[in-house]
Amino acid sequence: MRRSLRLTAAVILASALALTGCTSLAPTTGPAPDASGGDPNEKGAVALSFAGLDIQVWNTLLEKIEPQVEDAGYEFLSDDPQWDLQTQISDWESWIARGDVKAIMGYPVQSDSMVTVTQQAQQAGVQVLGYASQWEGTSAAVLIDNRTDGINLGKAMGEWITDKYGSDAAVPVALLGYWDTDLGRERSDGIEEGLKSVAANVSLTEHSVISLDDGYKAAQNQLAAVPDTKVWVSMGPDPATGAYQALLDSGVDPADPDVALGSIDATDDILDTFTQEGSFWRVLYSPRLDDLADAMADLLIASASGSELKTSTLSSERVTQDNADSFYVK
């Protein structure tokens, strides 16, 4: 129990520090001019808009990107739409109306619904950049190969299932997926494809989840409906963390050899758990968050400065005991 309490506290603290350190809960309006009448942000501003700030990875990225943008001479803006599409659209419209915002990078609540405000931005001279996916009107993006990540995770979990339980009887598996965004849908579908590709005999139950609390509740519901569930696969780190917590709270031994959890995206807290001897967090794929933050910051700065823009794709790698240290955020 002491381990489970430490994990939850760490996640909450990390999110709280990120929220207070580099982001605002409403679109930032920028500082007032100084007493001499000069503009304290002569180069202008850039903005980064995630769908919601209840995702630890996104808070980490904000913390890493902000100083790089400010070192380049730009004000850094962010918001927290809390997964509400109209709020995100309104935030972008406010940034466009400021007149000094050079670029907006976003992970939309719904990509297709951001096309109109993206066109408004481009017409106003504000370039729109994608994170993890692209949509009509974006100038460039930092992409993640979400489907491949899901397939790789599904394959690895399927192989573990077959090695552990054989293929005679269907093994109950809880899929902590999300189908309302491009990233979530591509990863979730990829996981199922990966499981099928290795002919793992599974009885799959899908749960649509996005946050730590969602993952916790989904695990509780899964255990109530299918108590013998031993395998958990998550498209994201926060639902996986919530499910891990729920399993500990239900009495599962962290070193239980019959239980397996696999997920995508390695936060520092997850790496701490993954690298524990005997941990049932058995499979983990991730890009290095430092590399991802650098690519995003570089694209924002290039866009703001009028440099040539190039779309890049970051691949994930399987995290192991041998390479785990290289995935920690520096």
Image (cartoon, rainbow, N blue to C red):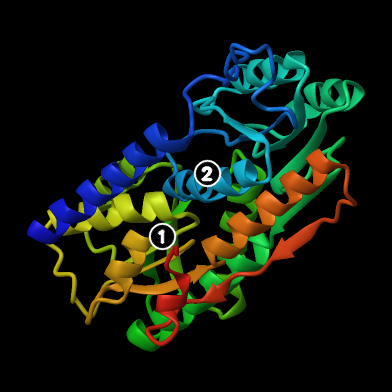
Q: Is residue 223 above or below residue 53?
A: below
Q: Label for residue 62? A: 2
Q: Give the quadrant of residue 240.
A: bottom left
Give the residue at mark 1.
Answer: 267
* Callout 1 secondary element: loop
Q: Identity of the amino acid at label 2?
A: Leu
Which mark lies nearer to you, 2 or 1? 2
Q: Where is residue 233 drawn, in percent x and y?
A: 42, 62
User: Residue, x 75% and y 50% (percent of image)?
Assistant: 299
Q: Is residue 200 visible?
A: no
Q: Which residue is nearer to you in this view: 175 or 295?
A: 295
Q: Which residue is nearer to you in this view: 297 or 248?
A: 297
Q: Is residue 67 visible?
A: yes
Q: Is residue 255 above or below residue 163?
A: above
Q: Label for residue 240? A: none
Mark 1 Cα within 10 Å, few/some/many (few <14, many 20+)? many
Q: Where is residue 4 drawn, in percent x and y?
A: 16, 56
Q: Give the quadrant of residue 129.
A: top right
Q: Give the quadrant of residue 330.
A: bottom left
User: Residue, x 32% and y 60% (percent of image)?
Assistant: 269
Disc with the residue nearer the chain's start (2 vs 1): 2
Q: Where is residue 232 drawn, in percent x and y?
A: 37, 63
**Relative to 210, is 51 on the left or the right?**
right
Q: Where is residue 63 drawn, in percent x and y?
A: 48, 46
Q: Identity of the amino acid at label 1?
A: Thr
User: Residue, x 58% and y 43% (percent of image)?
Assistant: 179
Q: In 3D space, how far apart are the residues under numbered discs 2 and 1 (Cα atoms)?
A: 14 Å
